[in-house]
Image (cartoon, helix red, strand yellow):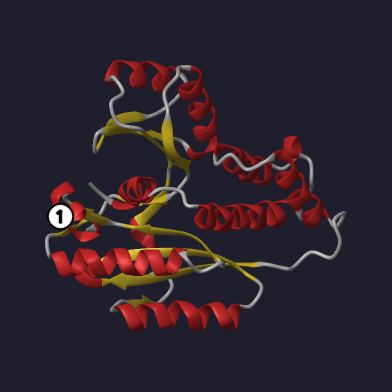
Amino acid sequence: MSGHSKWATIKHKKGAADKARGKLFAKLARQIEVAAKSGGEIDSNPTLRTAVQKAKAERMTNDAIDRAVKRGTGEGGDGVNYETIMYEGYAPGGVALMIDVLTDNRNRISAEVRQIFTKLGGSLAEPGAVGWQFARKGQIITVEGIEEDDVMMAALEAGADDVCVEGGGWRVTTDPSIVYEVKQALDEAGIETISVGSPLVSENLVPVTDLADAKAILRIMEALEDNDDVQDVFSNFDISEELMEEAMS
């Protein structure tokens, strides 16, 4: 099992602690705020529409979403100017990482990302060194125990490109522009999901068979995602279910 979809499953199995949910909502609010700077109307701002859909999929409240939109449009007081940066790097075993950042202090986050890599055995790469391997795709992961026919019928009728096994559940792949419409179709069909988004996905998967490497990869990804400025981390690792369970223990 590989990359972003496997990482989403790992985080789901670890559970959604209140602290982790609070950190997630803060990151979602920042994404909405930045998107709203180009206009606060969802119908005319596709970036804002996607950010709001993502927040609602994570059960962020309408009040919190509205406050973030107002900050972005200047109605909620002085907003913060955020900069988008994509860092690239390597984890042990030659695994590629893409780190999506929204920050108000480039120097601070650059130092913090570099420190994480240095401390945990990875390395930063030059821009473009690994990014060529990745492309953005809509991706939905279902819970385990759903019948294949049920998922395929709902997903493909809604415009999904593919449905394949992901652990005990299913990974639905779509064009990024319709991922939340497909998620809604699955909801209406009574199919529970554990993650939805438009991650950077690589077709060049790196097999990881060493336990120490697997543990190191997870430590780096967790440390990066724990940073308030890091919005998401994408990777191309391919780790078996057995090794993943051992690495998480």
Secondary structure of the residue carrying tag 1 is: helix
The residue at the point 47 percent across, 45 percent down is 198
Other residues around mark 1 within 10 Å, as few (<14) / some (14–19) / many (≥20):
some
Residue 185 location (% of width, % of height): 50, 21
Residue 90 location (% of width, % of height): 31, 71
Q: Is residue 113 visible?
A: yes
Quadrant for residue 44, please give it: top right
> Which is more toward the observer, 79 or 97?
79
**For residue 36, side relative to residue 183 (left or right):** right
The residue at the point 42 percent across, 33 percent down is 193
Residue 64 location (% of width, % of height): 72, 47
**For residue 234, side relative to residue 18 (left or right):** left
Q: Is residue 130 visible?
A: no
For the C terminus, give its image quadrant: bottom left
> Which is more toward the observer, 20 or 1?
20
> Which is more toward the observer, 56 or 114?
56
* Residue sitting at the far front: 18
